[in-house]
Image (tube, rainbow, N blue to C red):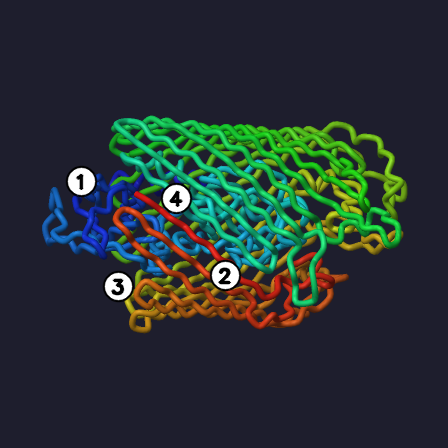
Amino acid sequence: MVIRWTAALAAALVAAGAAADTRVTGRAVIATSGAPAAGAEVLLVESGQLTRADADGRFVLEQVDTGAGITIHVHLGLLAGETTYLPAPRPEAEIVLSDPIRIAFLGTRHEHVTVTAASGEPAGFGEFGTVSSFEGAELLAGTPSLAELLEGAPGVAIRSLGPGPARPIIRGFDGDRVLVTEDGVRTGDIGSGAAEQGTFADPTQAERVEVVRGPAALLYGTNSVGGVVNLVSTGSRLAHAATSGFEGRASLGGGTADAGRYAGARVHAGGDGWFAWGGGNTRRTGDYRSPLGSVDGSRTAMDQGEAGLGLRGRRAYLSASARLDDSRYGVPLAGMLHGADEGEEQTVDVAMERRQLRTDFGFEGLGEFFRAAAFTVRYSEFVQDEIEMEGDGPPELDTHHENRSLVFRGELEGSRGRFQGRMGGWANLREFTSAGPEALAPDTRHTAIAAFALGEIHAADRVGVLVGARLENNAYDADERPEPGDDDDHEGAEEGDFEPPAVVDRGFLGTSASAGLRLDLGEQNALVGTATISTRAPALEELYNFGLDAGIQAFEIGDPLLERERSRGFDLSLRRDSDAFAGSVSAFWYGIDNFTYGATTGGRGGVTVIATEQADARHLGFEADGRVRLGGADLTASASWVDAQFPELGRHAPRIPPLNGQVKLDVPVRGLRIAPRLRWAARMDRLYAGETPTDGYAVVDLTVSWLLVTGNATHHVSLVGHNLTDAVYRHHTSVIKDVAPQLGRGIRVSYSIRFF
């Protein structure tokens, strides 16, 4: 019903529209020198159309709907600028911008107008969903993990068991309700399943990192009710807007509180009809120091490398790439469950490897309505080993996981008159195997297939309507559960203490839909409301896990008879965008039937027992963020709060972040930028069974950075002082918060060069 209604409404409005046919040309230059901004990315904010400037800084945007006006944003490395054009009373076949667009180092001011690859919509003021984007200087400050980078975004917290296995929580949702993607495709790891499992995503090597919340998240999976975190790579940008010449960047840095050091480089080149890219990075940290002392077992190591080659014609492109990832990190305190003799150190490491092949191809200028088609095929082999070491003894392999996946995604993009949208299909063929004493789930084949559509209709000059739908089927074909292995070294609960649930093959067909309404309240204000209905199939781990998981220090019991989750969500957002102030405040509500969670059912032999159960849940919260311009400086602030409960059980949901936020002042002093920041959180005492209260905190950070533009290169030096008062603070969402506070006082130093 929803799909038929959506298609009928879109078709009616498409038929009534007229195709845009205005050509816009202009030039971009570097403000400090007047040199051409060769290779700069040029974005038409209203439609998301993307191109690049040529060697003379000139660019062309085709088939532009000037409507009530257009905004063009130009971005090159750490430099950015934009211009707004108001059209003449009569339609024009061609618009030539008389003044060049001058780009300069603007800190984070430009981030509200970037385009998210995950949604395909212009972010910020005109966006139906909520988008936070990180790029430029924020990615060069040496932030060691994706979760830590995103911590400052409204509604985002960290789920962690130390710095290695850290992942984002969005609006109180984590695990299989938050998607992490690379160029819109899932990463192929198993990191959403447990707190001790991490992700390969490294923010310092991305071109841009985006957090997408709202209806557009349905394009990428029904298990994205919390949101989608998308990393945009160099290869993705080149495929959509290739440039001639040679460009690249290199960075290195280190930190004191965790003995961290990293280095990385990326280059890309292009010529007549071809482009290529490649690079790699390495990162190491030791056990981090908290204000109360060193946290043993928190060390990390990561190495990554990739290379790709592509061809591009006037109306088509094709690229292929290979990527290798290796990571190893400690699991703090996990050795307590492995029966180490008193006085003898026991450690547990997690080693991950990923081998990935990917091809992307697409077509442009297909016809009057469908202007582009994009396709992705990705094959990934992921291996994860749990390694135990006792005292000075040799490392021993304890448990081995493999996850192979083949992903296909195809998408058509079109616009006509007042309508623009996307539709496509997606498939994920996954094979999971596991062996060893802590092989919790049986070998399983998981097949997922989906079709989706999302469209925006400009129903009137100040009214926009969004409609979307997704149909997805998930099927699990599981083998018999293996016999328990010898596990004499593990103390506490044993598999023999419980009866394992029978293995049952399952299938889940679900429909999801979204709708939104945007009202422009004058030139600077907008009111946006959205509604979403979505269905999530249980994750493999929720269905089949059974056994001791040392990472979370618990014995897990899955339920193969779980039902689908069915959620209803509503968002209401008031936004303003002006020269003096830009910001928004949003309120959201989710009602979820059959919410799947790990219920603490007591202990056995000193080990917590967690059984997978379902209950109706309710999430309610708000997010607010804003930026005030104080002369040449920017004052930014954000805050978020969520309350999650099981109303029928009279309980709060587990691991929910408290009221939290940050305040930051960004002061430019010629080439320098000085940015003090205050991060804060209130006391959390809305607790699930077995949780302990967490005190509030206020943490002071300071960033001092310097940018130098020399010819066709930018040099960026950053000095970040974090937790300057060495405050003892704990994240309520950390599994080990009661015994391991967060990072103590320290300094991170980084240097980056970008040439173009």
Q: Which residue is mark 4?
A: 249
39 over 323 or under it: above or below: below
Relative to residue 677, is residue 17 drawn left or right?
left
- For the residue marked with disc 3, what is the amino acid? Glu
Q: Amino acid at mark 4?
A: Arg
Q: Secondary structure at mark 3?
A: loop
**Above or below, comparing residue 673 to residue 532 in the picture:** below
Give the mark, 1 or 2, whose residue is nearer the N terminus.
1
Q: Is residue 694 left or right of residue 266?
A: right
Any mark on residue 502, and which? none
Say whether disc 1 or disc 3 marks the residue closer to the N-terminus: 1
Query: What residue would you read off at disc 1?
Result: 21
Q: Nearer the viewer, mark 1 or mark 4?
A: 4
Marks 2 and 4 close (CB-CB < 8 Å): no
Q: Front-most of 408 and 356?
A: 356
Local secondary structure at mark 4: strand
Front of the two marks 1 and 2: 2
The residue that appears at 37% across and 33% down in the rendered structure is 412
Q: Residue at x 54, y 52 (%)?
A: 144
Circle 1/circle 3 CB separation < 8 Å: no
Cα–Cα gap, marks 3 and 4: 39 Å
For label 2, count other residues whose C-alpha is less than 10 Å away and answer few (under 14), some (14-19) or many (20+): some
Q: Is residue 373 above or below residue 152?
A: above
Mark 3 to mark 2: distance in Å? 29 Å
Question: Which numbered disc flags the more N-terminal residue, 1 or 4?
Answer: 1
Point out residue 38 in the picture as x, y percentages from the top left corner: 24, 43
For the point 65% across and 33% down, the residue is 383
Residue at image x 11%, y 52%?
98
Task: Kindly identify which residue carries mark 2.
Answer: 152
> Disc 3 marks which residue?
523
Instruction: Tell me which amino acid carries mark 1.
Output: Asp
Viewer-nearest of discs 3 and 2 = 2
